[in-house]
Amino acid sequence: MIYADNAATTRISDRAFEMMMPFLREQYGNASSKYSLGAKSKRAMEQSRKQVASAIGADPSEITFTSGGSEANSWVFRCVADIYRNQPMHIITSAIEHQSVLNACHALEQGGVKVSFLPVDHAGRVSVEDIEAAINSNTRLVSIMLANNEIGTVQPIEEIGRFLKGKSILFHTDAVQAVGHIPIDVKSLNVDFLSASAHKFNGAKGTGILYKQLELEFSPLIFGGQQEHGLRAGTENVAGIVAAGYAIEESISLMADEAKRLRKMVEETVDGIKEKITSVRVNGDSIYRLPGMVNLGFEGVSGEALMHLLDLKRVCVSTSSACTSGKEEPSHVLLALGLSEQQAKSAIRISYGRYNTSDEVDKVISAVYDAYSKILGTR
Ligand SMILES: *Cc1c(COP(=O)(O)O)cnc(C)c1O
């Protein structure tokens, strides 16, 4: 099997797996228990908090573990709405955010919050000018993703952060696709909140990360005990948290080499497919893009059909994000780029990661070509 869908999730790294295992069996203490078995869990968790903090330039006290990226995103919106309840509130986000952000916005709209969903250019980039134009006196939060999960386009977050500095508008970035893949420093990005998820950087599923700038008052999303600075109650997912720490550390140490390697694999894949299928188009930005990801459009051919035929050839790719597949609608991200419904439905996403090898490139190219020819041939 060739797994080329690392934007959906990744295989856990061997080291992260090894490091988390003891916390499921021998060292299964509750981190809140005061005897040494509990203290060991607590210590391991705090070690992970340090690893995560150091990976993104934060202080450990600014890191809260959640159940995933979706929870981290949801929490930010719930909390900001709490802070400004009973006041007119306006939020700025983009049209190409992950569902967890878009749906959090839609929920707040039900309660009277105004939301601007900014358009993007043909490459999927948000502009600072559009943010500037959208701001009004009620704007409390700007939330723009760092890198898109369908096309890989990387947003000018640092530039937006510079612009928002000193404006008393909170700034959040969904960095789930970016953390562990491209360098990130929360201080130079000037963000107040940042979301990440361990299973997108070779950690385990079910562990998310919310960075929150220290001075901010924050309300709990889950009520109960004093876990996670009293902000997120419930017995912690110690094993997953331990895995997240080692996975992020490892991703950072391999990042530069991996980025180079994955970029080359993507380039060769695109060139190889273009050679056989000249009409193929690359959706997204050619420069500001995540190293391992590319979104390709095959004019006149269904992306869904391609994906299924590739699956029969044991090659895993996706049509759009995993969260929207299963629904018939074309991708909201591709429509926002200005593609037609037909074009949006003709796309597949290939995303390489740590466990892909360069000899898989040729196999992916021929599998895509065979699948494409088969669809054309059956007409
Ligand atoms: C995967 C993803 C999420 C959701 O993260 P989970 O941990 O799966 O809840 C949020 N945003 C983006 C950009 C993602 O790619």
Image (tube, rainbow, N blue to C red):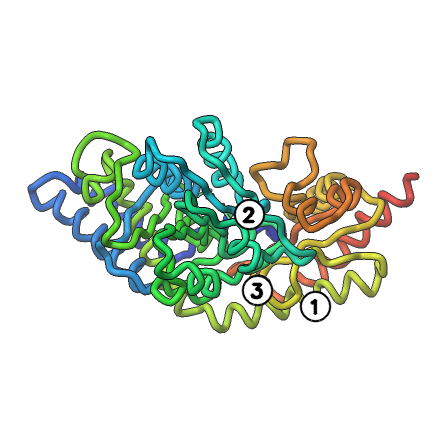
Neighbours of disc 1 within 10 Å: few (<14), some (14-19), many (20+) = some
- Left or right side of 196 for 32: left
Give the labeled residue for mark 1.
268
Q: Position of residue 329 (x, y in %)?
A: 69, 34
Q: Position of residue 98 (x, y in %)?
A: 53, 43
Q: Nearer the viewer, residue 213 or 163?
A: 163
Give the residue drawn at x 73%, y 49%: 338
Give the residue drawn at x 50%, y 52%: 145
Q: CA distance from mark 3 to mark 1?
A: 13 Å
Q: Nearer the viewer, residue 310 or 273?
A: 273
Q: Residue furthest top?
A: 110
Q: CA distance from mark 3 to mark 2?
A: 22 Å
- Left or right side of 86 for 258: right
Which quadrant holds residue 307? top right
Give the residue drawn at x 30%, y 39%: 83
Q: Earlier in the sequence, mark 3 or mark 2?
A: 2
Above or below, 102 relative to 40: above
Viewer can see residue 352? no
Q: Earlier in the sequence, mark 2 or mark 1?
A: 2
| Badge 2 amino acid | Ser
Q: Callout 3: helix, strand or loop?
A: loop
Viewer can see residue 40? yes
- Left or right side of 366 for 357: left
| Badge 1 amino acid | Glu
Q: Earlier in the sequence, mark 3 or mark 1?
A: 1
Q: Position of residue 156 (x, y in %)?
A: 52, 62
Tell me, yes or no, whether the two marked residues, 2 and 1, touch with CB atoms within 8 Å.
no
Label 3 within 8 A of ligand 1 by Cβ: no
Give the residue drawn at x 48%, y 36%: 114
Give the labeled residue for mark 2.
94
Q: In this rendering, which labeled residue sits more in front, label 3 or label 1?
A: 3
Give the labeled residue for mark 3.
291
